[in-house]
């Protein structure tokens, strides 16, 4: 049973104001046993508040809500969200502190998502408090939460320090810093975790002297916490702290802790260092990067855990791009490239796949000669990798290499890789390569495409998976847009129309889908003379699915055709299909006739 306490709302009776009647209904819903009704009522809270007016919202509705905070999590979540937008409904910033009691209760409940939403709403309304109200109402709430008996309230407090700190007096600031220090060494790991996750944010609002005196010692302590879940959050804070400190203080105050994190015994902490590496690199600047981060990055690329190697491999291009220009090439060639060469043949496919998604970007950094001599052999090795994702990632990033050395250097090795992916047993892999085909075609040129890849594109049209046939149809349209109508007439259209006589009705339907996609790109002449006769002939197909798709095709290609063809050829066929024995054929034929009436028949008048 749910507690349904609170004031009895004075609602309008026969002699009262009927406009308040819906409010009575909503209040009843808030007391209803059905969760969905209560949820709907909470979502309409602003309506209730508007109808009650600001004073009654403050004196009746808010106390009622504060007393009702024993409910299902989804109702409480909706309530926490609504209250964040309630400032004007309680009378504006002057009365915004009235929203604090219900939000304070919500910030202490057991369910994390509700607490987080309550903290989000509290942070939002904190900006609407005047400096005086902040000290009188908001800051005491933060103190109560920070010294609460339950860890839930103490974790919520961690998210509120940074929003009130900048606008309170120096005495109160000192108290806030003390509370934060206490929470950073709380007995409960969940509280230390919450404090560590807000350390960087809190550091940003502190005066520099306190960043050095308070934050650094907290950062060092959290980065050495017994729980790895706390230590890895300290790594995130490291980025913010490093950007706040002057360059000359970084070496002494931040680097020892960062070096320790990069070699932490827990792979999760090392993973976090690898994941944040580019941000750390920008925060510490070029000198420390050269002396400290380059060796640390090499170690992460050689880490014993695959997850760490994959996270580091993902950052290779970014790390190299951000190296100081005067020594970039030397560092890459002598320190990074040897590690990259090892990763190309890593035992873990996720590591190889992560590297393959960024390695092509190195060619623009290293230039033509180095790409041909050092990177090309790696690309070629990855194009032959047994893992389809690795081959796919290389193919999908070809444009970087094309800019530097031209794709011809790769074309002989590209072909077998593309063919293998095109015929991969996993249909999603086949789908991915189809999506890159227009890009590849543009880079390889029409001759190479016709000679080597055209047959693949046609083979996909008869794939046993519908999604592949559909993507292949779309692919043809993009290729025609790239290579032009004349190319389509000579190369694509005859093969597509040939499928109209295929014994498999699915392939005959693919002909219709292709015609739908190609008619606009091919233009009126090809559509009228070559495609239309095939569509009309298929109106006599034995399979009803094909016949109703003929009706849909005629409606689709109608705008491309001239009025003579519409009058003498299309109209009679649609009229015949409209009297078909099959209900679906009839329906789609009639749809086509009425659809065409609006934009085609005017051509005929």
Image: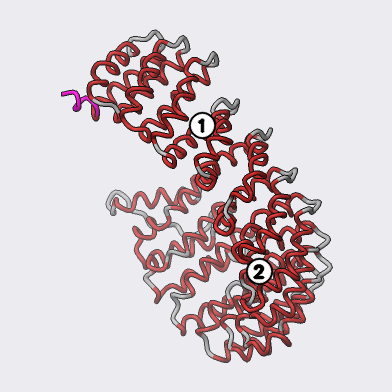
Residue 603 colored in magenta in the image: yes
Residue 250 colored in magenta in the image: no
Q: Is residue 155 visible?
A: no
Residue at coordinates 49% horizontally, 15% vertically from top-left? 501
In-front residue for pair 462/89 = 462
Say which residue label 1 marks: 470
- The tag on residue 319 is 2
Residue 463 horizontal side relative to residue 270, left or right: left
User: SS for tag 1?
Assistant: helix
Check the image and name the residue furthest to the left. Answer: 605
Main SS category, magenta section = helix
Task: Please tell me whether residue 35 is drawn above or below residue 463 in the rendered image.
Answer: below
Residue at coordinates 35% horizontally, 21% vertically from top-left? 532
Q: Position of residue 600 (x, y in %)?
A: 24, 27
In-front residue for pair 525/35 = 525
Q: Is residue 515 visible?
A: yes
Q: Position of residue 380 (x, y in %)?
A: 70, 50
Q: Residues within 10 Å of mark 1 (few under 14, many from 20)?
A: some
The magenta region covers 600-605
Residue at coordinates 60% horizontally, 75% vertically from top-left? 201
């Amino acid at each position: 049973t749910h507690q349904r306490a609170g004031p009895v709302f004075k609602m309008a009776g026969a002699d009262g104001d009927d406009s308040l009647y819906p409010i009575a209904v909503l209040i009843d819903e808030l007391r209803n046993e059905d969760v969905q009704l209560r949820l709907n009522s909470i979502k309409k809270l602003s309506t209730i508040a508007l109808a009650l007016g600001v004073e009654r919202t403050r004196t009746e509705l808010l106390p009622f809500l504060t007393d009702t905070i024993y409910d299902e999590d989804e109702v409480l979540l909706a309530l926490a969200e609504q209250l964040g937008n309630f400032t004007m409904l309680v009378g504006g910033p002057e009365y915004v502190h009235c929203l604090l009691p219900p939000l304070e209760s919500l910030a202490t409940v057991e369910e994390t998502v509700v607490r987080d939403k309550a903290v989000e709403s509290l942070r939002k309304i904190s900006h609407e408090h005047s400096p005086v109200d902040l000290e009188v109402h908001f800051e005491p709430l933060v103190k109560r939460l920070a010294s609460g008996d339950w860890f839930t309230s103490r974790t919520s407090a961690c998210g509120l320090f940074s929003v009130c700190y900048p606008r309170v007096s120096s005495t109160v600031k000192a108290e806030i810093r003390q509370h934060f220090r206490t929470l950073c060494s709380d007995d409960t790991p969940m509280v230390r975790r919450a404090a560590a996750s807000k350390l960087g944010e809190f550091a940003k609002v502190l005066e520099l002297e306190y960043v050095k005196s308070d934050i650094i010692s907290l950062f060092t302590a959290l980065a050495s916490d017994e729980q790895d879940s706390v230590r890895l959050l300290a790594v995130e804070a490291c980025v913010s702290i490093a950007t706040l400190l002057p360059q000359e203080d970084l070496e002494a105050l931040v680097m020892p802790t960062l070096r320790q994190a990069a070699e932490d015994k827990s792979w999760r902490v090392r993973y976090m260092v690898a994941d944040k590496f580019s941000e750390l690199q920008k925060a510490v600047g070029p000198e420390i990067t050269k002396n400290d981060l380059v060796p640390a990055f090499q170690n992460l690329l050689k880490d014993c855990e695959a997850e760490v190697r994959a996270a580091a491999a993902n950052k290779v291009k970014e790390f190299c791009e951000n190296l100081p220009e005067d020594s970039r090439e030397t560092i890459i060639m002598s320190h990074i490239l040897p590690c990259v060469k090892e990763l190309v043949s890593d035992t873990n496919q996720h590591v190889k796949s992560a590297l393959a998604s960024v390695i092509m970007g190195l060619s623009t950094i290293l230039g033509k000669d180095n790409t041909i001599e050092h990177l090309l052999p790696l690309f070629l090795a990855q194009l032959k990798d047994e893992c389809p994702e690795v081959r796919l990632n290389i193919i999908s990033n070809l444009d970087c290499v094309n800019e530097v050395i031209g794709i011809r250097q790769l074309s002989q090795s590209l072909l077998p890789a593309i063919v293998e992916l095109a015929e991969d047993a996993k249909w999603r892999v086949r789908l991915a390569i189809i999506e890159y085909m227009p890009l590849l075609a543009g880079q390889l040129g029409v001759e190479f495409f016709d000679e080597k890849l055209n047959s693949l594109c046609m083979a996909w049209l008869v794939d046993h998976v519908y999604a592949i046939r559909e993507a292949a149809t779309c692919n043809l349209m993009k290729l025609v847009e790239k290579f032009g109508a004349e190319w389509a007439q000579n190369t694509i259209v005859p093969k597509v129309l040939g499928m109209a006589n295929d014994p498999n009705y699915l392939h005959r339907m693919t002909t219709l889908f292709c015609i739908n996609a190609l008619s606009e790109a091919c233009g009126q002449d090809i559509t009228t003379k070559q495609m239309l006769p095939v569509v009309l002939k298929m109106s006599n197909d034995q399979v009803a699915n094909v016949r109703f798709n003929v009706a849909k095709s005629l409606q689709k290609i109608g705008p491309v055709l001239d009025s003579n063809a519409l009058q003498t050829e299309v109209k009679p066929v649609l009229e015949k299909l409209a009297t078909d024995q099959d209900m679906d054929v009839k329906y789609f034929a009639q749809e086509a006739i009425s659809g065409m009436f609006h934009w085609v028949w005017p051509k005929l008048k």
